[in-house]
Image: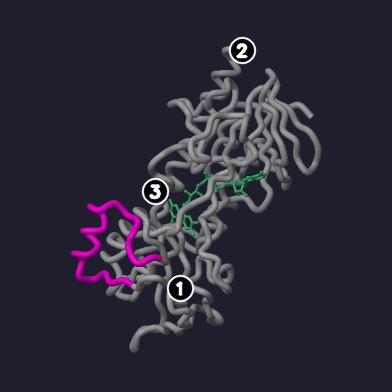
Amino acid sequence: MKKDIIIIGAGPAGLTAGLYAARAKMNTVIFERFMAGGQIASTMEISNYPGAPEGISGPEFGMRIREQAEAFGAKIMDVEVLRVDFSGELKKVYTSEGEFEAPVVIIAGGTQPRAMGAVGEDKFKGRGISYCATCDAAFFEGLHVYVIGGGDTAVEEAGFISNFARKVTIVHRRDELRAAKSIQEKAFNNPKIDFIWDSVVDEVRGNQRIESFILRNLKTGERREITPEEGDLMFGLFVLVGFVPESKLYEGQVEMIDGYIPTDETMMTNVPGVFAAGDIRVKRVRQVVTATSDGAIAAIEAEKYLEGKK
Ligand SMILES: Cc1cc2nc3c(=O)[nH]c(=O)nc-3n(C[C@H](O)[C@H](O)[C@H](O)COP(=O)(O)OP(=O)(O)OC[C@H]3O[C@@H](n4cnc5c(N)ncnc54)[C@H](O)[C@@H]3O)c2cc1C
């Protein structure tokens, strides 16, 4: 089936691109394999998106941009993109519902936070376990927070979290951090931060909220249960062990750097007519506000690209 524009992924970037493209009267389709909203649908509150001072839940935010995009005429299909072929003038996209083609494609497949792999982790995602310090640190004001990871992001973000938390414990699987020396020094000099070495989280336990987790020492094999300190009802667990771009599909089709897709200022990849927007791009700040911004730019520039072809 032929479209003016195909957008892969209905996270904040893809939905915003769809909204702009459909509003510009392009015949627009967005493919999404899970649910509209993308990663943000996994958090119960977004409190840093401009214009929503009272905060908004992730699922509601996703639903609202979806409605807005559909109101302008974008078609959102619940399908998975399985394969792409960007070699011709018309780009081909093979989905679980058949083959589509368009002169322009926007890749907005985002990333997945890398999980720590503990039993019970899925159950508490967005409900005590967070993968985004910028987004969620403020929810743990005055509490004890555990940060899992030892790289630049984990150690740097532990410092950020310490602006809110009473105490931050970094749990790392090795006996020394991987983070840059300057970042490490800051953490070692921060009186609110301490460390548990050579350890991983095996299991997270609880009913409505996290009640405890099991730490395993990789050197001794010892397992111990960590519970909230006296007087606290809960604690926070930040898993900051990296992200994985959803880009396997595009290997050999567009240029990539460590799985992320580089673009120019117009969001165009190295392949004319193929754009990328949001977290899947090579960029420094991965947030909703930068994803929506990328989506808007990609759609506007895609329209200009198509006009130029006429
Ligand atoms: C728990 C959590 C809390 C967060 N809180 C905040 C916050 O408060 N504020 C903030 O600004 N940012 C927050 N973030 C970051 C924010 O969610 C991301 O920056 C943003 O969602 C990126 O948008 P995106 O559209 O680029 O990608 P994504 O949101 O990752 O969306 C990509 C979509 O593409 C779909 N997709 C991928 N491949 C395919 C395929 N082959 N076929 C079909 N569909 C596909 C995926 O299913 C997904 O729905 C949070 C992230 C997490 C994980």
Callout 1 touching callout 2 (CB < 8 Å): no
Does any portion of residue 125 appear in the rendered image?
yes
Among the two numbered marks 2 and 3 on one chain, the one whose residue lies closer to the N terminus: 3
Indicate the position of residue 254 as horizontal and vertical percent values: 58, 29
Determine the residue positioned at 58% across, 68% down.
122
The span from disc 1 to disc 2 (Cα, nearest Å) is: 59 Å
Label 1, on which residue?
Answer: 218
Residue 118 lies in what quarter of the image? Answer: bottom right
* Amino acid type for the residue under numbered disc 3: Pro
Label 2, on which residue?
Answer: 309
Residue 50 is tagged as 3
Among the two numbered marks 1 and 2 on one chain, the one whose residue lies closer to the N terminus: 1
* Amino acid type for the residue under numbered disc 1: Leu
Residue 116 is tagged as none
Residue situated in front as seen by the camera: 189 or 158: 189
Q: Is 141 on the left-hand or right-hand side of 273?
A: left
Q: Is 267 on the left-hand or right-hand side of 158?
A: right
* Amino acid type for the residue under numbered disc 2: Lys
For the magenta stretch, what is the residue range? 174-195
Indicate the position of residue 96 as horizontal and vertical percent values: 78, 43
Residue 107 lies in what quarter of the image? Answer: top right
The span from disc 1 to disc 3 (Cα, nearest Å) is: 44 Å
